[in-house]
Image (cartoon, rainbow, N blue to C red):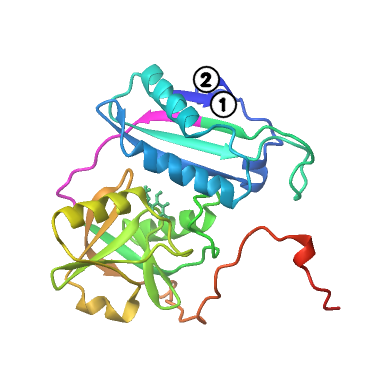
Amino acid sequence: VIGYYNGRFVDPAEGVVPIEERGHEFGDGVYEVIRVYAGRPFLLEWHIERLLNSLSAVRIASPHDALGYKELIQTAIAKSGEREASVYLQVTRGAALRNHLFPEGEIAPAVSLVVRPVTTHPSACVGTLLAQADERWANVYIKTINLLPNILAKQTAHDAGADEALLVRDGYMLEAASSNLWFVRDGALITAPTDRYILPGITRRFVLDLAADLQIPVYEQKLPYTQLARVEGMFLTGTTTEIFPIGEVITHPHCPIEATLPSVAPHPLAVEPEGCTRIW
Ligand code: PLP
C-alpha cells in the first residue's frame, strides 16, 4: 500500500490533506480507478484520456499531461510493490479559503493517489440488482468525486440483499452505481449509449472491442425498464468489478421506479458573459 499527495509519497493513513481542500469541502474534483494486473496498469491510456476529459469538463487546468500521469502511476505502482492492485487517482481544484467561486489567481490543483492490493472475487458468482430511480445529476459522464447518490443507491441495494443498483432514469435502465450495465438478447448485446447519463466505462469500451473481435452484434441503445422480462442475460462491467454476471433483478416498495419527464438536451458548462441576454 502506498499513498501520494502533491508531490510526496506518504502512508495513506497520514494526515496530509489541508482542511480547506476543495475536494473534501465541495467534492470539487475528479478521479480514476485503474486496475493493476501482474504489476502492470490495465488500459492506462484510456483512463488518462478520460481523466483529462473530466478535468476539462469541470474546468480544472490539469497539473500534468498524459505522460506525467503515466509516470506518476507507474512510479507509485513500483514503489508499492503490489502486483494485483487498484490505483485510486484524484485531482481536485486545490486548497483555498472556502468560497463557491473558483479561487482567484493561480492555485495548484491537488493530486492524490493510493495504490492498494485487491482481492479478486470468484468468477462463478452470480449477482442480484435492486432496481432504483437514478437520482444523480445530469452530467454523470464526468467522473467526479461527488458520489453521494451512488453510495446511497449501492448501500440501499446491499441492505436489500443485492450486489448493485440498477439505475432507472426516465423509464430507461442506464447503468449501476459503480459499473456499466449490459443485456443479452437474441444473440446480441445491448448497453446504454455514452451520452451525459452514464459514465463512459473503460471496461465497457474494452468489452465493445472484444465484441467486435468476436463479431457479436452490439446495440448501444437505452432499454426501457418495461423490456426487462424479454432479456435473456445481464452482466456488469467495471474496473474492479471486471465482468460480473447478473442472475436476478429485485424491487422494493421504498424504491419506486419513477417515470419522469424526458430529460433536457446537453448544455456547455462554461458560459461567456457576452452571450447573456437581460430578461428582467
Ligand atoms: N459507471 C459508474 C457510475 C462507475 O462509477 C463506474 C466505475 O467506477 C463504471 C460505470 C465503470 O467504469 P470503468 O469500467 O471505467 O471502471
- Numbered mark located on residue 82 in the image: none
Q: Which residues are magenta?
A: 113-125
Q: Name which residue lies at 54% across and 73% down.
A: 265
| Lateral position of residue 39 relative to residue 1, left or right | left
Q: Is 202 contained in the magenta span?
A: no
Depicted 146 relative to depicted 228: above or below: above
Residue 111 in the figure: left or right of residue 241:
right
Residue picked out by circle 2: 10
Residue found at x 33% / y 44%:
239
Identify the residue under disc 1.
5
Horizontal side, residue 188 vs residue 91: left or right: left
Residue extending furthest toward the front: 274
Q: Residues within 10 Å of mark 2 (few under 14, many from 20)?
A: some
Q: Quadrant of residue 162?
A: bottom left
Tell me the residue at 31%/61% (across/down). 181
Is residue 161 in view?
no
Residue 219 picture quarter = bottom left
The residue closer to the viewer here, 237 or 25, is 237
Mark 1 nearby-residue class (10 Å; few <14, some 14–19, many ≥20): some
Q: Is residue 251 left or right of residue 99?
A: left
SS class, disc 1 = strand
Residue 122 inside the magenta-drawn segment: yes
State whether residue 129 appears in this view. yes
On whether ligand 1 comes within 8 Å of the CB at mark 1, the answer is: no
Q: In the rendered view of the protein, which quadrant contains the N terminus?
A: top left
Quarter location, residue 280: bottom right
